[in-house]
């Protein structure tokens, strides 16, 4: 394989004036993995890395980032274009985040320009100023500063506003007032009494450090049980600096209360906290709980916000005006003026892995960020990933355990129901329906977990057996009824269901299998006097619909909850005492080596929704494999024993975390092109890289998706360094190879799914 690269020195005969010319080496939003050289404007030099610039790129203008200034370039002077504008006087990212960006692009083998682009809000990518324009601020008058709190004892909202403004004599912007939940009516009332005033700042000075230590708790802390107290004391007494903690607690053990009390300690020291959660659905309730506890700005950052809202949160975090930032995966790149702690809730969750484009893992990037910023990071989970447990066993992470449920709640009783020979109605056996009837009669709630949305996974002809397929994928489209359509959940294509079978002409077309929509309809008919709530991506698509469902479920009355994994993690349903899992067999025989781990985590997480309050809980798991070793060990010995068995198996087979792995994907409209390309790469690796095992090429588990034929080449090594060295050579060749331009290829480091 011939590896092509960009030269680092001037060519012979290049003029001395070019070498003396100020040259900017830029990262541009491009799929290419190298920088681009441009002339800097006359008189401009010694710019800090990370400032944004506007530059011509092809026929358009783009905004890029200065990587560094160079004294010379291999681009001829006549062909070197000039930077059009220097946008910033300071870097958008501080030194630690800048180093994080460079590390992440290098580790995940991703173009640095595209990685930087995805790390910042859309408006920053479009050239908006780093700092907000001047806005009105509020501060106390001399009379307000002298007033005792007794003077507003009958006006609690005004008193709260007075207390917060007194802690910030320099004033608070209107945006920060909103983040602190200071009612505008209270500010106006204080102004009418001559206690506060609205003013326009004279200049945009850097925001001062908020007085977090002076802010009291808005809600009293709960009393910790013995295990929680031990965990909190360990976190509290630990020396400052980088350290990775695993807070492993059974579902309902009170991990969040330990987080909250440790966060309070960090806030009192004047520092900020970043909290990552796996799902956008968990963000609002997490923010609400944190806002109820702390009198400091608690801001959310996730894909559900508008570009302007994301920009406001990003700026406030960067300026140090946000005490706590809570977000999903991409929030790991949020700048903090005074970082003090990172918390990753449900660290095992697959949602932390970006599956397209810049394929980073939010948990691993967060750990690297904590290391660069020299702050602690807490990973929380009832079912830690095998990678995290391997790091605990190796002594790199420290584990704190919560083995008991908080408040005296008991662990649910788990029973596997043997489905062999039983008659199922809408996916449920007689024992499950009887248990649901008994639970609802007591005024309690039932959660039915079915990780398959839609009405039915397949539509078929009852006369000849024809099954509807996707025209663009090797998959069956799911039948939905509201509205009626066949939708492929892989490529997103939709079409009306046919009226007649295209093979035999029969009109007897039937749904096969059960999805959440069909199950919820059936249970609504069976339990006609009981509300049935369906929680999946379809039922929560409209803004605010998820909150409406959660509020309805929170009522202490009998109800049936039917949902996908959106219901399986992080939620506290005190009235749910029965969990029914209609089918767990798919994960027992998964083609992905991570399948058993994912199934064990899912079963434990879903089971943990039952009996979280004073009422005992039960879990019924329907299976055709009740004697399967994984199920037997999981429910008799617990998750830790099951995870240790899986770790031992991975060690024997040389699979992660006992090895390092990367997945090279290639796809094209023609089946031969990706196969030939990966065959060449595999042959070269076997010849020149003996430390790297190349498995394949092989068709992807879904060989055709969205009209593209897909092939995989799996790479594995016992050490991480040889894998990355080999991949850097592979990437250089792919970028220069005419053959590679015929296909769309990507590299996934530490792949979590082999799909």
Image: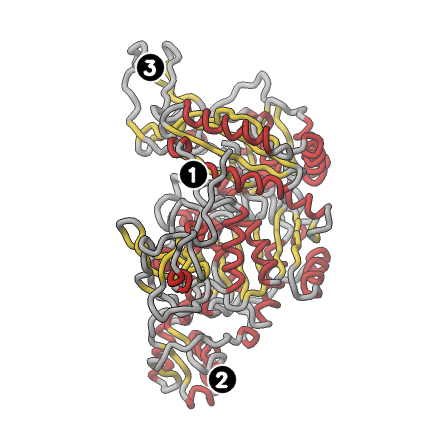
In the picture of the structure, the residue carrying the numbered disc 3 is 508
- Depth order, front residue of 612/28: 28
Give the structural element (helix, strand or loop) at label 3: loop
Residue 86, horizontal then vertical, whole percent: 35, 65
Residue at image coords 33%, 71%: 133
Which badge, 3 or 2, is on the more N-terminal residue?
Answer: 2
Residue 570, horizontal then vertical, whole percent: 54, 48
**Does residue 495 appear left or right of residue 518 in this picture?**
left
Q: Which of labels 2 and 1 is toward the front?
A: 1
Give the structural element (helix, strand or loop) at label 2: helix
Which badge, 1 or 3, is on the more N-terminal residue?
Answer: 3
Q: CA distance from mark 3 to mark 2?
A: 77 Å
Residue 742, horizontal then vertical, whole percent: 38, 31
In the picture of the structure, the residue carrying the numbered disc 1 is 736
Q: Report crowding for label 2: few under 14, some 14 to 19, many 20 or more residues within 10 A (C-alpha).
A: few
Q: Are marks 3 and 2 in contact (CB under 8 Å)?
A: no
- Depth order, front residue of 314/77: 77
Q: CA distance from mark 1 to mark 3?
A: 55 Å
Q: Which of labels 3 and 2 is toward the front?
A: 3
172 lies above or below 11: below
Q: Which of labels 1 and 3 is toward the front?
A: 1
Q: CA distance from mark 2 to mark 1?
A: 74 Å
Number of numbered discs present? 3
Observer able to see residue 560: no
464 lies above or below 422: above
In the picture of the structure, the residue carrying the numbered disc 2 is 150
Give the structural element (helix, strand or loop) at label 1: helix
Which badge, 2 or 1, is on the more N-terminal residue?
Answer: 2
């Amino acid at each position: 394989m011939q590896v092509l690269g960009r030269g680092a020195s001037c060519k012979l005969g290049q003029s001395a004036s070019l070498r003396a010319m100020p040259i900017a080496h830029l990262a541009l939003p491009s799929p290419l993995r190298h920088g681009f050289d441009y002339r800097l404007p006359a008189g401009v030099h010694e710019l800090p890395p990370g400032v944004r610039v506007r530059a011509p790129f092809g026929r358009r203008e783009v905004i890029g980032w200065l990587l560094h200034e160079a004294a010379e370039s291999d681009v001829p002077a006549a062909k070197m274009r000039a930077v059009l504008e220097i946008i910033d006087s300071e870097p958008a990212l501080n030194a630690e985040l800048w180093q994080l960006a460079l590390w992440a692009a290098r580790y995940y083998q991703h173009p640095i320009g595209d990685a930087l682009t995805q790390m910042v809000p859309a408006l920053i990518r479009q050239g908006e100023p780093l700092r907000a324009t001047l806005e009105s601020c509020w501060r106390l008058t001399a009379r307000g500063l002298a007033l005792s709190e007794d003077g507003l004892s009958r006006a609690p909202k005004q008193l709260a506003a007075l207390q917060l403004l007194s802690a910030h004599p320099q004033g608070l912007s209107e945006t920060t007032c909103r983040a602190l939940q200071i009612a505008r009516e209270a500010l106006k009332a204080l102004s009418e009494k001559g206690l506060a005033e609205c003013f326009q700042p004279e200049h945009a000075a850097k925001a001062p450090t908020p007085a977090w230590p002076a802010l009291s708790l808005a809600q009293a802390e709960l009393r910790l049980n013995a295990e929680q107290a031990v965990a909190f004391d360990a976190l509290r007494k630990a020396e400052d600096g980088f350290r990775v903690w695993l807070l492993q607690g059974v579902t309902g053990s009170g991990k969040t209360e330990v987080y909250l009390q440790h966060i309070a300690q960090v806030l009192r020291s004047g520092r900020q906290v970043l909290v990552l959660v796996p799902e956008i659905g968990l963000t609002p309730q997490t923010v609400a709980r944190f806002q109820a506890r702390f009198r400091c700005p608690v801001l959310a950052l996730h894909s559900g916000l508008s570009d302007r809202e994301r920009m406001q949160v990003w700026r406030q975090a960067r300026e140090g005006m946000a005490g706590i930032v809570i977000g999903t995966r991409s929030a790991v790149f949020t700048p903090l003026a005074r970082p003090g702690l990172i918390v990753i809730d449900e660290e095992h969750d697959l949602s932390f892995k970006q599956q397209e484009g810049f394929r980073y893992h939010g948990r691993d990037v967060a750990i690297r960020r904590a290391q660069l910023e020299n702050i602690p990071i807490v990973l929380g989970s009832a079912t830690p990933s095998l990678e995290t447990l391997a790091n605990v066993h190796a002594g790199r992470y420290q584990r704190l355990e919560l083995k008991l449920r908080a408040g005296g709640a008991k662990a649910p009783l788990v029973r596997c129901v043997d489905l062999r020979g039983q008659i199922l109605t809408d996916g449920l056996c007689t024992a499950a329906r009887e248990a649901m009837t008994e639970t609802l009669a007591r005024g309690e709630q039932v959660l039915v977990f079915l990780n398959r949305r839609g009405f039915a996974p397949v539509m078929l002809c009852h006369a000849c057996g024809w099954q509807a397929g996707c025209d663009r994928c090797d998959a069956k489209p799911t039948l939905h009824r509201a509205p009626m359509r066949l939708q492929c959940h892989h490529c997103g294509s939709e079409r009306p269901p046919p009226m007649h079978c295209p093979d035999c002409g029969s009109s007897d077309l039937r749904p096969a299998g059960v999805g959440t929509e069909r199950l919820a309809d059936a249970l609504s008919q069976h339990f006609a006097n009981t509300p049935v709530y369906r929680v999946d991506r379809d039922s929560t698509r409209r803004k605010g619909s998820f909150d409406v469902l959660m509020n309805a479920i929170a009522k202490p009355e009998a109800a049936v909850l039917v949902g996908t994994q959106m219901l399986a993690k992080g939620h506290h349903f005190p009235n749910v005492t029965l969990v029914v899992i209609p089918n767990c067999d798919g994960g027992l025989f998964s083609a992905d080596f991570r399948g058993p781990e994912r199934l064990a985590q899912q079963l434990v997480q879903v089971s943990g929704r039952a009996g979280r309050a004073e009422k005992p809980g039960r879990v019924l798991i329907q299976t055709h494999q009740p004697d399967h070793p994984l199920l037997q060990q999981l429910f008799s010995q617990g998750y830790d024993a099951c995870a240790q068995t899986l770790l031992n198996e991975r060690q024997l087979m040389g699979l992660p975390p006992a090895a390092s792995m990367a997945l090279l994907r290639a796809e094209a409209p023609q089946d031969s092109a990706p196969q030939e390309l990966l065959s060449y790469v595999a042959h070269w690796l076997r010849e020149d890289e003996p430390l790297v095992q190349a498995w394949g090429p092989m068709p992807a588990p879904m060989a055709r998706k969205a009209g593209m034929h897909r092939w995989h080449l799996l790479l594995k090594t016992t050490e991480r360094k040889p894998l990355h060295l080999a991949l850097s050579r592979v990437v250089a060749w792919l970028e220069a190879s005419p053959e590679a331009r015929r296909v769309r290829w990507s590299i996934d480091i530490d792949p979590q799914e082999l799909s």
